[in-house]
Image (cartoon, rainbow, N blue to C red):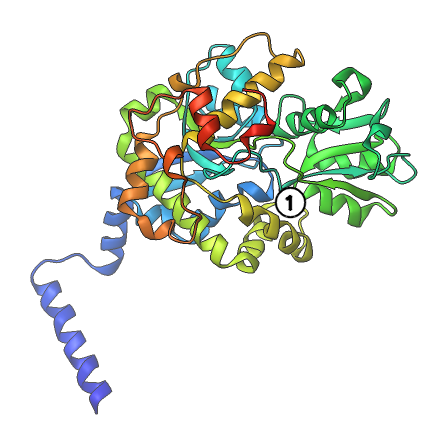
Amino acid sequence: MRHVRIVVLLSAVLLLAASCGGPEPGERQAQEAEDLEEVRAGWVSAIDQIGLPAALDLGYFEEHGLSVELAQPFPTGVDALNALQAGEVEFVQVGTPTIGAILEGMDLVYLGNYTGSSTQLGIDETMALVAAPDSGIDADDLSTLEAKRIGVSIGSINHLYMLGVLRDVGLQPDDVRFVNTDPPDIPVAIRTGGLDAAAIWDPWPIITTLQVEGAEEIIRGGGHLPFIGYIVTTREYAEQNPDVVEGFLAARAQADHWMRQNPDDAAEVAVRWVPGTEQQVAEAAMQYNIEQLDPRFSACNYLALYVDQQLLLEVGAIEDTFDVNEHFLPGHILAVMEEFAQYFEDLTPIPEDAQISEDYRFDPQEAQAACPGSEDFPV
């Protein structure tokens, strides 16, 4: 009888709402949908970028007032930036390719991290170097990389990772032959002998070792570079849409928190969204990914971008650098960190000296002193 009374009462409430001219349920949903700001976002086909589709699947964007449409995953960050420049998307998740884009005149701003660390400098657990069968590359003697054909996406984070590996083992970029290769093409290139090895982000190292008999993961991570992976938009868009920016960052931070707590469920999201990814591959890759899910900004993130520019300049990959202060826009993620502290409560606290304010001005020496692990990199 108690259930009947509840049903009768609920029916009476609904009838009263209808008699007062309130919208029907379908009409309310339509009104709510109309109130959402429409946003288009781009991402790269990689496990460490899966927070964007995860936020979409889980409804977090709607919770923060946004209706987000995802572009088909791009092969590299360069392709994602081309889409941003063409006005096809408003946000992208990208790292190293922003350096070349800014130097070429694209007015980008960094809003938050999709991967990286705000508590230390050298972190690269989502990267690996995979060698072909009989490549002659010895994991215990990386000088054997000399003269090998190594697949990378020129201008992307895996290219920078490989430059860091070479520097750390005493080789020059000219000591190897870089072959520009899109990540999905790497397993075939390794199998058919087109490459001796490839440096790439997850899930492709794991996929390659599973698909190519005898292929071997030579290096995993290793702290060879300060990893950079930012949520990016144009300065004009950020200035005109501050509430959208904060809603987007809040939803992404919420998704990162969920993934850190539920890595196997996050792996299922990756299987649905990253073409050709099997459950066992996604679960293995996600264990590395969650180590770098830190959307916060600190002096360490400024320093990471500064150091990576210096590394690219040293090897002649770029001819100039830019002032990182001019392209970080930290106020929005700082506001999210304050308003939604629960999304960050499981993360290691940012070192006090590395914490920043909205008007923070980066100084390389001060940031190096504040960020653990920075002593191994040129500042």
The amino acid at mark 1 is: Pro
Where is residue 282 drawn, in percent x and y? 63, 52
Where is residue 327 drawn, in percent x and y? 40, 20
Residue 245 shows in this picture: no
Q: Residue at x 67, y 22 (%)?
A: 154
- Quarter of the image where one finds residue 74: top right
Q: Looking at this rendering, what residue extends furthest in the left direction?
A: 20
Would you say 138 lies left or right of 34 here? Answer: right
In the rendered image, which quarter contains the C terminus? top right
Q: Residue at x 44, y 32 (%)?
A: 370
Q: Which residue is mark 1?
A: 275
In the rendered image, which quarter contains the N terminus? bottom left
Classify mark 1: residues with Cα within 10 Å, few (<14), some (14-19) or many (20+): few
6 w.r.t. 113: above or below: below
Q: Looking at this rendering, what residue extends furthest in the top direction?
A: 319
Where is residue 345 drawn, in percent x and y? 37, 52
- Quarter of the image where one finds residue 159: top right
Residue 162 shows in this picture: yes
Would you say 78 lies left or right of 117 here? Answer: right
Residue placed most toward the observer, 355 or 335: 355
Where is residue 138 drawn, in percent x and y? 86, 37
User: Which element carries disc 1, helix, strand or loop?
Assistant: loop
Residue placed most toward the observer, 43 or 224: 224
